[in-house]
């Protein structure tokens, strides 16, 4: 049984290729999962993830069943393993957006159907597929240099695995104490460099990426994080250090005026909304790969 909890779980090159082809040919895969049912579970609020996964299931011909935590009570009202054993009797795949990655692992361990991570505190693999698709539309992935500025969070972790597995390199700039986990950096390999000066990450990069400084569930840390990340905003001056043809990426939602300025978000080389669209094609590729 294959799952997609982390980037390493599936062949990223195959997913990027299929997602790219689905983006250019909307008939590819259309109706291929007719008669199948896909469970979509949201423990966290969502905009892009909710819309993209529900539309992806519909375009593939599957029936999406959307579930919220108020009805399931994952880990409180019912054990994750029991929830999964029941869902597997009704569904062909379940995709979940959760707070705790350990819940996903418990569900996958008990699963007889594929489990997809739509976001956890440790990883955001479907986002990483969309990210790499967006970079690949701009230039070959092999030899691509990505500059990431911000928190070494779940988005950063999945991005660095996707970039290095695609033949690229990534320089990550974080304040001291906000680096991605050392074990993840080691696993991603020599294509990852972690620095503490945003200029060192961005200089000469083919793609510049940032994310919010305070993620959902970290609201109590907002003041401390704003102080720690002072100087890490991607503005015109910092973006200007990148390759002259560099693109700008952000997984959204963006806190304009914090991690990025309006000028960079609206820059002619911003690909933020192409990247958001690619979430649809990326998750279609993931679901199709695991179910068909």
Image: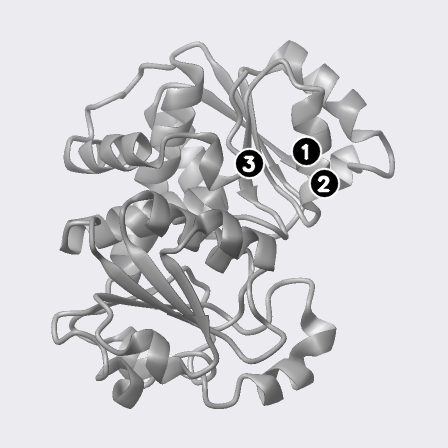
Q: Secondary structure at mark 3?
A: loop
Circles 1 and 2, Cβ within 8 Å, touching? The answer is yes
On the rendered structure, is 240 left or right of 160? left
Residue where numbered disc 2 is placed: 102
Q: Earlier in the sequence, mark 3 or mark 1?
A: 3
Q: Position of residue 65 (x, y in %)?
A: 56, 26
Q: Position of residue 183 (x, y in %)?
A: 59, 53
The picture quadrant where one finds residue 98 is top right
Q: Is residue 93 visible?
A: yes
- Look at the image and name its color scheme: one colour
Q: Which mark is residue 5?
A: 3
For the residue carrying disc 3, how many other residues have a C-alpha within 10 Å: few (<14), some (14-19), or many (20+)? many
Q: Is residue 244 above or below residue 224?
A: above
Circles 3 and 1, Cβ within 8 Å, touching? The answer is yes
Residue occupying image coordinates x 41% and y 66%: 193
In this orientation, which residue lies closer to the viewer: 31 or 271?
271
Alpha-carbon span between mark 3 and mark 1: 8 Å
Q: Position of residue 239 (x, y in %)?
A: 26, 80
On the rendered structure, is 218 left or right of 208? right
Q: Earlier in the sequence, mark 3 or mark 2?
A: 3
Alpha-carbon span between mark 3 and mark 2: 11 Å
Q: Is residue 261 visible?
A: no
The residue furthest right is 77
Q: Quadrant of the N terminus?
A: top right
Alpha-carbon span between mark 1 and mark 2: 5 Å
In this orientation, which residue lies closer to the viewer: 38 or 148?
148
Q: Quadrant of the C terminus?
A: top left
The picture quadrant where one finds residue 181 is bottom right
Residue where numbered disc 1 is placed: 105
Circles 3 and 2, Cβ within 8 Å, touching? The answer is no
């Amino acid at each position: 049984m294959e799952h997609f909890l982390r980037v390493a779980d599936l062949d990223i090159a195959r997913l990027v290729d299929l997602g790219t082809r689905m983006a250019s040919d909307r008939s590819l895969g259309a109706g291929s999962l007719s008669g199948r049912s896909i469970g979509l579970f949201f423990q966290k609020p969502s905009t892009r993830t909710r819309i993209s996964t529900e539309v992806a299931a519909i375009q593939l011909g599957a029936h999406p069943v959307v579930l919220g935590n108020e009805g399931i009570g994952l880990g409180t009202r019912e054990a994750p393993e029991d929830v999964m054993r029941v869902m597997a009797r009704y569904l062909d795949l379940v995709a979940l957006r959760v707070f705790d990655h350990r819940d996903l692992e418990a569900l996958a361990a008990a699963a007889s159907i594929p489990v997809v991570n739509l976001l956890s505190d440790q990883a955001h693999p479907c986002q990483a597929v969309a990210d790499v698709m967006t970079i690949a539309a701009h230039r070959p992935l092999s030899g691509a240099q990505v500059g990431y500025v911000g928190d070494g969070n779940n988005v950063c972790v999945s991005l660095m695995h996707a970039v290095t597995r695609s033949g690229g390199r990534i320089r990550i700039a974080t304040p001291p104490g906000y680096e991605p986990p050392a074990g993840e950096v080691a696993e991603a390999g020599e294509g990852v460099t972690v620095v503490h000066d945003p200029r060192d990450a961005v200089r000469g990069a083919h793609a510049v990426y940032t994310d919010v400084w305070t993620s959902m569930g970290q609201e109590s840390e907002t003041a401390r994080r704003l102080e720690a990340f002072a100087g890490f905003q991607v503005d015109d001056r910092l973006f200007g250090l990148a390759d002259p043809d560099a693109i700008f990426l952000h997984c959204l939602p963006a806190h304009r005026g914090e991690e990025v300025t309006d000028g960079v978000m609206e820059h002619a080389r911003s690909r933020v909304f192409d990247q958001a669209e690619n979430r649809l094609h990326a998750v279609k590729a993931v679901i199709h790969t695991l179910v068909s």
